[in-house]
Structure formats: C-alpha cells, structure tokens
Image: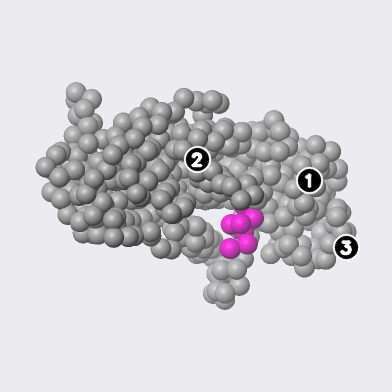
Amino acid sequence: MVEILTKPKKNAADFIDALFIFADDYLRPEIQKVIDYENLTWQIVDLAKFSETEFNLETIGTAVIDAESITDSNQEKWLEIIELLDRANIPTVLYGNTDNINIDKFEMLNIIEKNSARQIIPVIKISNVYRKKIIDIKNNNSDVSAKDNHAEHLETQLKMAGAVQRDFLPQTLPDSDKFKWAITFMPADWVSGDIYDITRLDEQHIGFYLSDAVGHSMPAALLTMFLKQAILMRQTIGNEYKIFSPLEVIDNLNEKMFAQHLSGCQFATSCYCLLNTQTLNLSYCRAGHPYPILIRKNNPPQQLQTRGSLLGVFDNAPFEQASVQLQSGDKLLLYSDGAEPFIGAVDDNQSFRFDSRFLDITGLPVSQLKSEFESLIRQDKNSAERDDITLIALEIL
C-alpha cells in the first residue's frame, strides 16, 4: 500500500481541507504558502499512485487537480478519478485551464484560472462548508448509502445539496409592529441558483439581499454559498462596528467575484437593500438584477431603477446607489429573474408592463400576496420549464 504524502502529518480519520492530486507529488510553493498561511490541512498524491492509495473519502473536503497535467495520454485516468470524486459528492477544482475535460459532465467540478494561488482559498473554504453538511446529512440518512443506481444517486446528491442550501437561508424573519416580511422560495430543481438573507444589523438597521447565480445545478448551488459568505453587511473592529452602505456591499462583492475567475458558473446578479427601521429610509444598490418594485397605495407599481452590471464581469465596475422614503402602506418587492414572467414583461416600446394578474394582487397584505403569487406560479402551464423563483416582500404597517 502506498502511503499518501502528508504535510502536516495528521490522523487518518481527521478531516482534510484539501486533497491535491497532481501528476507528481510536488506542491507548488505558491500554493503551499497560502494553504499554510490559512492553517488548512492538506494532503498530496500524484496521479500514478492515486489508484494504489486507500482513501477514506468522507475525510476529504475539496479535491484540487492540476488541470495542466491532463493530457491526451492520461485523460482516461483523470476522468476515472474525477468521476469517483463526483459520485462521492466531493467538490473538485481544476486548477488551470484544460480542453481535455468536459466540466458540464460533472456536477461537482469547477475551474479556477491559474492566475493566483490565493484564489483557491475561498473556494476550498466554501466547498468545505458544503461538504461537511453533506457528510452530516449522509450520516443521518442510512438510505443514502444504499442507492447504487446512477439516477437515484444523482437525485440523492441534489436533495442533500438542497437541504444544505436551506440551512443557509434565514430561519426567522425580523417582523415588528412597523413592518412585515414574506418570502417565496421555489427552486426549479432540488438545488437553487438563488440565495437571500434578511439580517438585523443593529437596533435601527436591517440589511437584506437577493442574489442569483448564473448557471445551473451543483455549480450554481456552490456559487450561492460563495455569495452568502462573501456578502459583508457589517464589520466589527474591537468595540466599534461599521454598517456598510449598499454601494459598498455590491462593490466589495463584485471585487471578490471578479478575483475568483470561476468558470462554468462565474457570474451572478444581486440587489442589496439597507432599511433604517426608525426613519423608514431605504437605500439600495443592484448588480444586473431585476429592479426592485415599490407598491404604494393609490399608485401604480414602480420599478426602482439604478445602474449596475453583472457581478464578476468587470473589475471596478460602476454601480449606483439610490434611496426612497417608505411610508405606512408601502410594499417593496425583490425578486429573481425566474419570477419576472409572473410580474411583467418589456413591451414593443421597451417599456416594462406589469401583468394584469400581478396587478390584481398588489393591494393584498404581503402574506396573502405571497400566497396568491405562488398560486399564479403553480397554475402556469409551462411550470416544467421555469427557472428558480424567489420573492422577498416587505410591507410597512
């Protein structure tokens, strides 16, 4: 039995943050430097010894493969390894570019361009959060190990990923005597490319957002977890704290997205809002996301338009922050693009026209609006082709 090369030495049963699989057993100094700086545990094995090495797959967090070592002559061997990792629900990163692997064939596979070793760190950290939750769910579900059929295995994999995603969503909403929240969260499949949060930042501020990963299935789900971890609403230093403005939140998120250079599912949209619960002033900033909608009594619904491109496309992309003074009776809606067909569409004059069915329910309290909106979706004849749908509704009482 070939012993896996280990730095630092650790017990076989311990969790490995990163397993590096290269064509040799040499870890590049620039990679080892950032891995050790972050105090991550790691192991390395070369391609030739992989099949001779006995692994406890449940101890592996993320696998990192040197993509540039994949050649026509060893492609079949690499495909066997990637398929093994994929079936074991282990997030796998191709470090560097290769035309020899079709990443769309695998649910757990992503690419990081070989520009900076530091790009590996956040991917490993986010993937490991996902991985540990998957292991926990699997250990509490004895039926999972009994599923040998590939289709059943894939369904089980996606179900577990969906359960992980829901763990990242807020379990309670910060309702009060001044405002009420309602949420619609309807993934098109077991996993969703949508992620949202509503968080009380201090006694008079609530931050909330909706983000939508461009892509599908597991890569999109993994990107939503990156977005969840990357969005910074508040920072505490010592006894002081700073609440970031919507523009600062979106600027920072775009910078982090751009730095990753993730392939396959590398872009996202987002809208972030900051509510002052005392003054009811709402500031907001969006990046490629559908415009928020303001519903005010005795007025037609209004799109709150601001400038902002997709996240992760351009470095130092320009985004615009705006604000609106809310008042009693107002409702504010954030939604993902999957919900847009049920809200309205752009007409021949390039003007957005609200759907009459949507207009019929805008006067309802948000709890009823949510229920009626979900009824519209369920009644849709093209429901099998729909995208992920998320709606955040805020009502000022």
Q: Measuring 58% from the left and 37% from the top, which residue is drawn there?
A: 256
At 68% from the left and 52% from the top, the residue drawn is 62
Disc 3 residue type (three-letter): Met
Determine which of the numbered discs, if any, sits on residue 244 in the image.
2
> Tag count in the figure?
3
Can see residue 72?
no
Magenta stretch in the rendered image: 126-134
* Label ID, residue 37: 1
Using the image as rendered, state which of residue 336 and residue 96 is in the foreground: 336
Pick whichever of labels 1 and 3 is earlier in the sequence: 3
Distance from disc 3 to disc 2, alpha carbons, whole Å, reads 54 Å
| Main secondary-structure element of the magenta-colored stretch | helix
In front: 381, or 321? 321
The amino acid on which the numbered mark 2 sits, given as a three-letter code, is Phe
Residue 178: horizontal and vertical position, in percent? 28, 56
Q: Which color scheme is applied?
A: one colour
Pointers 1 and 3 in contact (C-beta within 8 Å): no
> Where does the N terminus fall, quadrant-wise?
bottom right
Q: Residues within 10 Å of mark 1 (few under 14, many from 20)?
A: few
Q: Secondary structure at mark 2?
A: loop
Q: Residues within 10 Å of mark 3 (few under 14, many from 20)?
A: few
Query: Marks 1 and 3, how far apart in space?
Result: 31 Å
Q: Earlier in the sequence, mark 3 or mark 2?
A: 3
